């Protein structure tokens, strides 16, 4: 079986990181390694990692680096550069893998050579590991998983409702050439990365829960702090506008519509009702336009 490198960016998760590492060891897939970077944790995360390696490091290859904080995108790029595997399984130090997920995702990519990455579903647990939701996509994000059965559906789903809960992706290492790695400086990096994969129909889906996504109050993308939400939404709007040119119509208009929808959310948080109304109007017009536009004949031929 091909070697899978499980990439774990770790930051201030002293309560959870051992469970994350245990789950890699517990998964029955035989050809695997762990690459983990402590991105400048200020708690006992590094101590927990080192204790785990001292106890279990003889059972599989583990590469561990502890350094100053550089952010999630820079950490993912470093992890990928250090990995030896043909496939890269994105992990997280507060979530954990579910047994059988690695095998299911590897088999998908082996039987779908055009795909550079595959995503799955997750279960959702709380800080104690108690199950909250059976499906992160359906129950947490309200996604219609039927959209993910086709390339067109995946493009539309990734654009209009990024419904991925937790680290659920397996990539071919050469997918990083297709998607040009992670954009350093972004705080919420995954939507940007997967938009680039979806734009070239390189993303697949299996309806299998491959990880447990943990909600514990400190998740970066789940904050209720208004100022932080505005920063995160502003970043998402920038990503939408920047990546729209990667798509053909009607998805290009759909992504521009999404930028206006995000702008409306920002205006709402800033208590600017007139701006909310204007952005929602632009959103509705672009959504309607996207339904009327079809891909050009040349675009259809290029994708064929």
Image: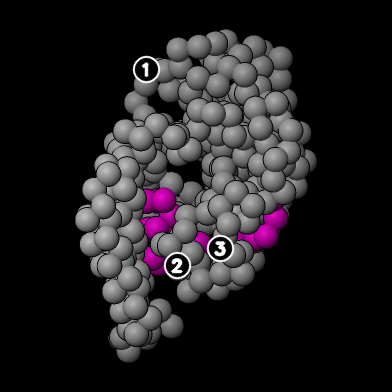
Residue 42's x, y, as percent? 45, 12
Mark 2 lies on residue: 155
Mark 1 lies on residue: 68
Mark 3 lies on residue: 204
Mark 1 secondary-structure assignment: loop
Mark 3 secondary-structure assignment: strand
- The residue shown at (34%, 78%) is 288
- The residue shown at (65%, 60%) is 206
| 198 vs 169: above or below | below
User: In the shown orientation, is residue 79 left or right of residue 96?
Assistant: left
Residue 19's x, y, as percent? 68, 26
User: In the shown orientation, is residue 139 left or right of residue 270?
Assistant: right
Q: What range of the chain is rendered magenta?
A: 191-209
Sequence order check: which comes first, mark 3 or mark 1?
Answer: 1
Residue 209's x, y, as percent? 69, 50
Residue 3 forms part of the magenta stretch: no
Nearer to me, 6 or 240: 240
**What distance separates the C-alpha of mark 2 from that of mark 1?**
36 Å
Q: Are marks 3 and 1 in contact (CB under 8 Å)?
A: no
- The residue shown at (42%, 18%) is 40
Q: Quadrant of residue 93?
A: top right
Q: Are marks 3 and 2 in contact (CB under 8 Å)?
A: no
- Mark 2: few, some, or many residues within 10 Å (few <14, many ≥20)? many
| 126 vs 140: above or below | above
């Amino acid at each position: 079986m091909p070697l899978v490198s499980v990439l774990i960016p770790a930051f201030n998760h002293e309560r959870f990181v051992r469970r994350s590492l245990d789950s890699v060891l517990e998964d029955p897939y035989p050809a695997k390694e762990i690459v983990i970077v402590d991105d400048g944790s200020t708690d006992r995360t590094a101590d927990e990692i080192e204790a785990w390696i001292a106890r279990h490091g003889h059972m599989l290859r583990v590469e561990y680096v502890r350094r100053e904080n550089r952010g999630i995108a820079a950490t993912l790029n470093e992890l990928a550069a250090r990995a030896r595997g043909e496939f890269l399984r994105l992990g997280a130090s507060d979530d954990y893998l579910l047994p059988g997920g690695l095998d299911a995702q590897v088999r998908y990519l082996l039987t779908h050579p055009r795909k550079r990455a595959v995503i799955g579903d997750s279960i959702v647990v709380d800080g104690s590991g108690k199950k909250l939701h059976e499906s992160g996509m359906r129950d947490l994000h309200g996604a219609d998983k039927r959209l993910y059965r086709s390339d067109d559906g995946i493009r539309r789903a990734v654009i209009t409702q990024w419904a991925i809960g937790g680290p659920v992706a397996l990539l071919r290492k050469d997918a990083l050439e297709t998607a040009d790695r992670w954009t350093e400086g972004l705080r919420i990096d995954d939507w940007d990365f997967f938009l680039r994969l979806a734009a070239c129909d390189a993303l697949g889906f299996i309806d299998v829960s491959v990880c447990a996504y943990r909600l514990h109050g400190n998740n970066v993308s789940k904050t209720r702090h208004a100022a932080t939400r505005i920063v995160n939404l502003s970043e998402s709007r920038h990503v939408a506008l920047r990546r729209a040119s990667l798509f053909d119509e009607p998805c290009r208009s759909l992504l521009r519509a999404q930028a206006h929808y995000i702008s409306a959310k920002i205006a709402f948080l800033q208590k600017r009702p007139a701006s909310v109304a204007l952005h929602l109007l632009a959103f509705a017009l672009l959504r309607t336009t996207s339904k009327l536009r079809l891909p050009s004949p040349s675009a259809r031929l290029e994708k064929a």
